[in-house]
Image (cartoon, rainbow, N blue to C red):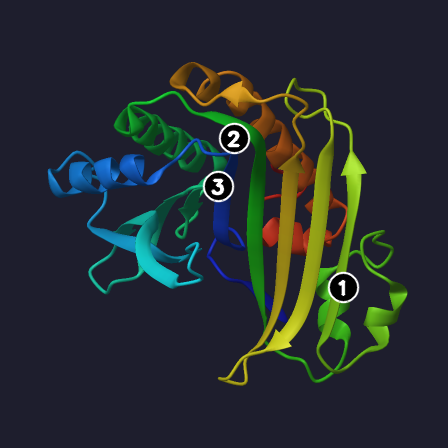
Amino acid sequence: MTLVQPVNEDNAIKIAAFAFELHPESINQDILERIQEKYHNGFFSSYNNIVPHTEMVVKITELEKQITNNTLGGLSLLQTDAMGNKIWELEINKNAIIVTCHKYTRWDPVFEQTKIYLREIIDGIEQDISIRGLTLEYIDEFTVLDNSNNSWKEELFLIDTKYLPRHIFELTDPWHSHHGFFLSGKKALNNRILINLNIEYVVSNEEIYRLIIRSQHRSLMENIIPFNSENVDSLIDEAMVENHKINKELLRNLLSESALQSINMGSNYA
């Protein structure tokens, strides 16, 4: 491509996130404090920083006296480079566990590393926990090198893509398109998948024009399942891989062949 450039040399993925919605009250303050202590004792050696999330709890007594306490509401374990830029982030809070990759390469190594981090945190919790939903989210980004006319859109998108209204090909100012729909999956945890597709053409403070594609694949599970190493390697693995394949098919129905080639997803690639 000459008018548009993906954010990375061989892919356009700026962030990939793997989120797991916890069964209510799976994570409490005692567990968070235990994880924090384990980090300081060197248990989580992959990370070089930890950020506590405080939450304010307000109680009203019988005498209508307000008592406010700050408690530990969550943690972020960070792996950063020498400049302090995030490479990996593992967030644990009372509602979810989220693993985010900020330096995406290809699916296989990233997802395998994600499962390693998940097993590590499951071992660190030392208590049975369950999940009732899981989500795979990508943020893809392209830089528009020449926005003098609308030619860049024809270079980036399929002209007849079903995921964008024809109106956007006429616009010169920044725009936004967001819609969602359901799919039925084939794997056990993917009976019903909510796809949210958010596409934005924006200008940053540096006067750089960007096209951002946020695709979220949320598996609406019918039943809760144990969040353990066995399921990470079986049911969860299968559901996430299926969501990844759905995302690839979505991009193939959104982007042009030249755009797909630029991110190693063209007709010459599996």
- List the residue tagged with mark 1: 177
Between residue 143 and residue 234, name the one nearer to us.
Answer: 234
Q: Residue at x 47, y 17 (%)?
A: 231
Q: Which mark is residue 95?
A: 3
Q: CA distance from mark 2 to mark 1?
A: 32 Å
Q: Secondary structure at mark 3?
A: loop
- Mark 3 or mark 1, which is nearer to you? 3
Q: Position of residue 124 (x, y in %)?
A: 26, 29
Tag shown at residue 214: none
Give the residue displayed 70% in from the left and 78% down from the top: 174
Disc on the earlier residue, 3 or 1:
3
Q: Quadrant of the N terminus?
A: bottom right
Residue at point 79% right, 38% down?
182
Which of 255 and 183 lies nearest the eye of the viewer?
183
Of pointers 2 and 1, the one earlier in the residue sequence: 2
Please identify the quadrant where the C terminus is shown. top right
Marks 3 and 2, how far apart in space?
Answer: 7 Å
- Indicate the amino acid at tag 3: Asn
On the image, numbered disc 2 is attached to which residue? 23
| Horizontal side of residue 17 vs 189, given as left or right | left
Residue type, mark 2 in image: His
Vertical placement of residue 149 versus 181, above or below = below
Report which quarter residue 171 is drawn in. Answer: bottom right
Q: Is residue 20 above or below residue 67?
A: above
Task: Report the residue that reaches farthest toward the left.
Answer: 41
Query: Quick one: SS at disc 1?
Result: strand
